[in-house]
Image (tube, helix red, strand yellow):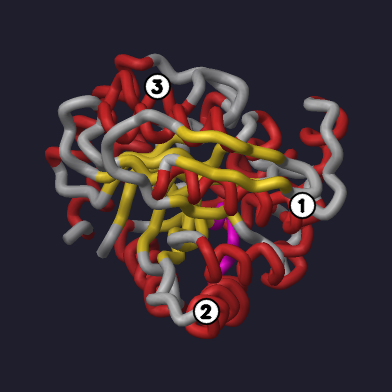
């Protein structure tokens, strides 16, 4: 299986800061054990691109961020940082971007969340020009960039967190693929994978990546783990986009979206996502310290 580790410790809360030393240790372990990559979230702790660059230098494996909210950085700043980080990481960076949610964009950052797909389209037009050609002369309705960057080195793939149909179509048309978080099996099989693949095909592009991010816990205490996950992920249910995911799956709580069970059960559940159209799985090991270690060990046995 193509499995990457997501450096998100849900047991400490999604916004809890993880030290550079811990990230470095996890990256080194993931590399030794043959995982497809290691990704960091962008929350309210360490800056993910900076932390990943500091901790992952010298490691030859895919290193990604999932995801940076586009409203927090102008595309020229994003391009400069991504090109610099990718150069330092030996060309191994994958840049994941997202529109975030109305609450954060408007109440926390003071920006307008009006027509986020249109904003993302303008953002990607400028960003991709800067990454690939090092120049962009674009006057959009909301974003402007007229200039060049003097940075040598390879461009990095750009992935878009896309939950709705228009954002998925945009991702399939211009980006390298999509990253989901807490999307269930039915959503991936019946909506996410077909929508983005059809958009890419219509644009004459190769099949995009569908990276499916999920909390995973290998345990014998399934009820207890499910209750803890429901408690930890309760805030996810407040965002309208995640409510839509729950409704599509016919579930009532975010904790029910987690992959929980014995080694054999978890392996089967992960394989089902790949059969449903995921190209790789991004796993956040969760639970007690013993359960997280048990999860790591199972995942290591499945990669390759």
How crowded is the residue under tag 1: few (<14 C-alpha within 10 Å), some, or many (20+)? some
Give me the residue at 85% from left, 27% from top: 110
- Number of marks in the rendered image: 3
Q: Position of residue 64 (x, y in %)?
A: 38, 41
Decide if residue 44 is on the left or right side of residue 85. Answer: right
**From what the image shows, is residue 51 above or below residue 140?**
above
Q: Quadrant of residue 280?
A: bottom left
Tell whether label 3 touches label 1 (CB within 8 Å): no
Mark earlier in primary sequence (3, 2): 3
Mark 3 lies on residue: 51
Near-viewer residue (83 or 30): 83
* Of marks 2 and 1, the one in the foreground: 2
Q: Is residue 91 above or below residue 45?
A: below
Instruction: Provide the residue span drawn in magenta.
Output: 180-185
Q: Nearer the viewer, residue 157 or 294?
A: 157
Residue at 61 percent of width and 37 percent of height = 146
Q: Earlier in the sequence, mark 2 or mark 1?
A: 1
Distance, label 3 to label 2, CA atoms, is: 35 Å
Whether residue 21 can be seen here? yes
Tag 2's secondary structure? Answer: loop
Which residue does the image show at 78% across and 47% down from the upper left?
Answer: 239
Q: State yes or no: residue 66 in magenta.
A: no
Q: Residues within 10 Å of mark 2 (few under 14, many from 20)?
A: few
Q: Does the CB distance between marks 3 and 2 fall below 8 Å?
A: no
Q: Position of residue 98 (x, y in %)?
A: 62, 46
Q: Quadrant of residue 45?
A: top right
Nearer to us of marks 3 and 2 is: 2
Which mark, by number, is residue 203? Answer: 2
């Amino acid at each position: 299986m193509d499995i990457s580790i997501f450096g998100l410790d849900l047991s400490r809360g999604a916004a809890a800061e993880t030290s550079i030393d811990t990230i470095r240790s996890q990256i080194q372990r993931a590399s030794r054990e043959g995982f497809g990559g290691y990704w960091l979230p962008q929350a309210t702790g360490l800056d993910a691109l900076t932390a990943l660059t500091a901790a992952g230098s010298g490691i030859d494996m895919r290193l990604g961020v999932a995801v940076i909210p586009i409203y927090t950085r102008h595309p020229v700043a994003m391009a400069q940082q991504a090109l610099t980080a990718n150069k330092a990481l030996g060309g191994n960076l994958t840049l994941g971007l997202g529109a975030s949610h109305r609450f954060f964009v408007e109440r926390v950052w003071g920006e307008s969340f009006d027509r986020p797909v249109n904003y993302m389209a303008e953002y990607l037009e400028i960003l991709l020009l800067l990454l690939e050609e090092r120049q962009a002369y674009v006057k959009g309705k909301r974003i402007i960039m007229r200039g060049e960057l003097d940075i040598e080195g390879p461009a990095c793939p750009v992935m878009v967190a896309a939950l709705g149909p228009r954002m998925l179509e945009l991702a399939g048309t211009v980006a390298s693929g999509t990253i989901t978080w807490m999307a269930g099996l039915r959503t991936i099989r019946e909506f996410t994978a077909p929508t983005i693949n059809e958009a890419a095909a219509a644009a004459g592009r190769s099949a995009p990546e569908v990276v499916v991010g999920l909390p995973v816990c290998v345990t014998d205490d399934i009820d207890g783990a499910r209750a803890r996950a429901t408690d930890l992920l309760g805030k996810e249910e407040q965002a309208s986009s995640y409510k839509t995911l729950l409704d599509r799956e016919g579930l009532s709580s975010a904790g029910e979206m987690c992959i929980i069970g014995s080694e054999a059960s978890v392996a089967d559940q992960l394989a089902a996502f790949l059969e449903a159209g995921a190209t790789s799985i991004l796993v956040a090991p969760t639970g007690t310290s013993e359960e997280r270690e048990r999860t790591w060990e199972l995942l290591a046995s499945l990669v390759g």
